[in-house]
Amino acid sequence: MNSQEFNLIKKWRDKGSKIGVCNGCFDYLHEGHKYLIKQAKKKTDKLILLINSDNSVKKLKGKFRPYEKLSIRKKKLINLKEVNLVISFNQTTPLKMIKNIKPDYIFKGSDYTKRKVSGYKFISKYGGKVIILKKLRGISTSSLIKKIKKK
């Protein structure tokens, strides 16, 4: 996180805004992502998306990913009206970023349980919450890619 991003988050916090984070690769932005982002924004004042760097995606998803470079993924995400800030990270989990931001909420899809969410223990210590959002069924980047490859 750079100083400009840090100062913006501090300004929001000083104004009393509730800050939430969602994280992921957002390797190929689809309706499932957009749905989760919309649901998260309904529950917070400012929504920050923490997005894996290209190297981080490769480590998590394999050598043929990401399908879109970080600059393209970030541009698509910041253009969503629900998103207030997009910050990339190089680690395989966003824990370091979560510790820097200290969000009020961490949002994750229903393929996770609260205790499996990166940052759960940390955010619980200061009264923040992990909120699990119901995902749209049958929509994931991996499933969409499999469908495309079959065509």
Image: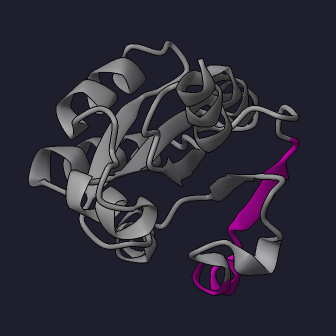
- Residue depicted at 33% across the width and 44% down the height: 66
As drawn, 123 above or below 83 = below
* Drawn side of residue 21 relative to residue 69, left or right: right
- Residue furthest to the front: 150
- Residue depicted at 68% across the width and 68% down the height: 128
- Residue furthest to the left: 3
Residue 43 screen position, x and y as percent: 75, 36
**Over which residues does the magenta segment extend?**
121-134
* Drawn side of residue 21 relative to residue 121, left or right: left
- Residue depicted at 18% across the width and 31% down the height: 71
Closer to us: 145 or 140: 145
Closer to us: 55 or 95: 55
* Rendering quarter of residue 1: bottom left
Residue 59 screen position, x and y as percent: 33, 69
Q: Is residue 126 magenta?
A: yes
The number of numbered badges drawn on the structure is: 0
* Drawn side of residue 95 relative to residue 72, left or right: right
Q: Is residue 50 magenta?
A: no
* Rendering quarter of residue 131: bottom right
* Drawn side of residue 66 relative to residue 30, left or right: left
- Residue depicted at 46% across the width and 30% down the height: 28
| Quadrant (top left, top right, bottom left, bottom right) of the C terminus | top right
